[in-house]
Structure formats: structure tokens, C-alpha cells
Image (cartoon, rainbow, N blue to C red):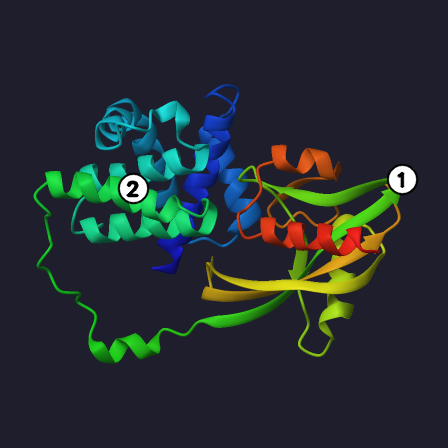
Amino acid sequence: MANRHLSRSIVLQTLFEWDFNNAKNLDIKEAIKRNIKEFALGLEDDVFVFTLAEEVLKKRVLVDEIIEKAAPDWPIAKISVVDRNILRIGLTELLFSDRKEVPPKVAINEAIELAKTFGGENSGKFINGVLGAVYKEMGEPGKDEKSKRKDGDKNNTKITTEKLGGALVYAQYKGVTYFGLVHDVFGYWTLSKGKLSEDEKEEDGTIRKIKEEIGLDVKILEKLGENEYIATHPEKGKILKKVVYFLAESDYKEMTLKHSGGLDGARWFTLASIPELRIYNDIIPLIAKAVEIISKK
């Protein structure tokens, strides 16, 4: 169910905040309420969110021990904040949920989908490997159960497509090149982007969205590439988001985050500081291409 997938995303987001702050100064229930209001307004199954988050925290010590046994080469502290909390969610559901409510395969698949959406390049494989190892130790319950969905139902699931425009914005200041990046609630620095209207050109729409999101007037120079990903909306269900990215030039001026959309910061960075940042793997090639283009100007 789309609502359940979105609910797990909210749980992950909240656990990320909790873990990132070393379990200090964060009221879990208030954080969940805030995240639902910010990213899932109208969510119907909020009881599931609160229940799952509470269960994960209650079973955390035991689950962490299981993770270390299933992945002996990866102590908890060395696993990324996102990945270890996806594992906590997945294992809590796999081991302690009512199997009629959350079948083992659903628990594993949902965790893998979270990893693909919010983790790094290899997160999906890592999550699948750990949960798969635990699943085998459990005796693979439900392995031979067939899906209750009829073949004819498969075609009834429609995926809405949205087109987005984004840009790697750069500026020159006193002989130094700066890149403008935005920070999301999952701890990654990424590129500013937004939904395009059907009747506008990609370049025009991207200029409009950059202005709306971080307050910069930009000039599009060149297309950097495209990518796509699946997102879940509480009412629309799964949405295929196709993003076209450009290299854009701007004056070096203060960025003002005007439309959050899951973001909590915006800053300029020099090229030398980029390698130290936590950046999504599919964004890194775009930055590399942009640097090559700029160096030839």
C-alpha cells in the first residue's frame, strides 16, 4: 500500500534525526508529527507510523546485535545512519511484526525500496544481503506463499510521471569557483530542483524553480544529464520522477531557502570542499562533468 510505504519513509526520516543527534534532544512523537505535517499531510495511517517507530526503538539493542552477527564486517558504528536505520526498520518488521499484516517478503522488499530511494549506490544490495541472511536463519517463512494479487490486477496500478528540472549552480567570486548546493533532511547535499509545468521549456522551468527554491537568478549554460526515481504520494501513489539537470551560472550572493520540499539548508562550496560532503552517487558524475565544462571556459 502506498500509505504504508510513505509511512515507513516518515519513520526512517524520524529515526535518522534521532540517530544523527545521538538520541538526544529529540521528542520522537513530536518529530513524527512534524514530519507527517511537512512531508505527508493527509496521511491516513499515522497510527502505523507511531507504532513502528516505537517498536524499532524498543527492540533496537536486540536488533543491533542481530545486525552485527549478520554483517560481522560492518560494526553498527561503521554503517551509514540511513542504512542502519533501514535495517532496524526491516528487521523489526521481519522478526516481530504480525506476519498476516507484514509478510516477511514485504518487510524485506520495503526495506530494499527504502535503501534504493534514500541510501547510497550499494545500499540496496547491502540491505538485501543482511535481511536475506536473517531470513534464511529463520527458515524462510512464507517462501512458498503465492501473492494474493490476481494477474489481472497488475495492470491496474498506474504510475504517474512528473518532469522536474534541476541545476548545478556555480558562481565566480574573487577568482574562486563556488557551487551552490542544497541539503536534504536525510543528510545529503544535492542539487536544487523542482516540478516543471507541461507547457514550459525545460530551461525556462528550471530557471523558475531555482529562483523559487533558493532565490537565485540563474543563466542556463548546458545540459548535464538526466535521471529518474520512484517517489510515493499519499493520494497519488507511486510517481515516476524524471529529472533533467543543467549547469547554471549565477552571481555570488546569499542563497535563501524559500521552498523547503524536504530541504533544510543551502550553501556555497568551493571545489576543494566538495569531496568532503555527503552527496548522492548519481549527482557526483554531474558535478565532475560541470567541473570539466567550467575548466574549458
Residue shown at 35% from the left, 25% from the top? 76
Residue shown at 13% from the left, 64% from the top? 146
Q: Tell me which label, 1 or 2, sits earlier in the chain.
A: 2
Q: Which mark is residue 175?
A: 1
Q: Position of residue 244 (x, y in %)?
A: 64, 65
Residue nearest the observer in this picture, 7 or 224: 224
The vertical placement of 10 against 220, above or below, is above
Judged from the image, the secondary structure of the residue bearing numbered disc 1 is loop
Q: Position of residue 226 (x, y in %)?
A: 59, 64
Residue shown at 53% from the left, 48% from the top? 281
Depth-wise, is mark 1 or mark 2 nearer the camera? 1
Q: Which mark is residue 97?
A: none
Question: Label 2 is placed on what type of residue?
Answer: Gly
The reply to whether residue 256 is visible in this rendering is no
Q: Residues within 10 Å of mark 2 (few under 14, many from 20)?
A: many
Q: Which mark is residue 90?
A: 2
Question: Label 1 is placed on what type of residue?
Answer: Gly
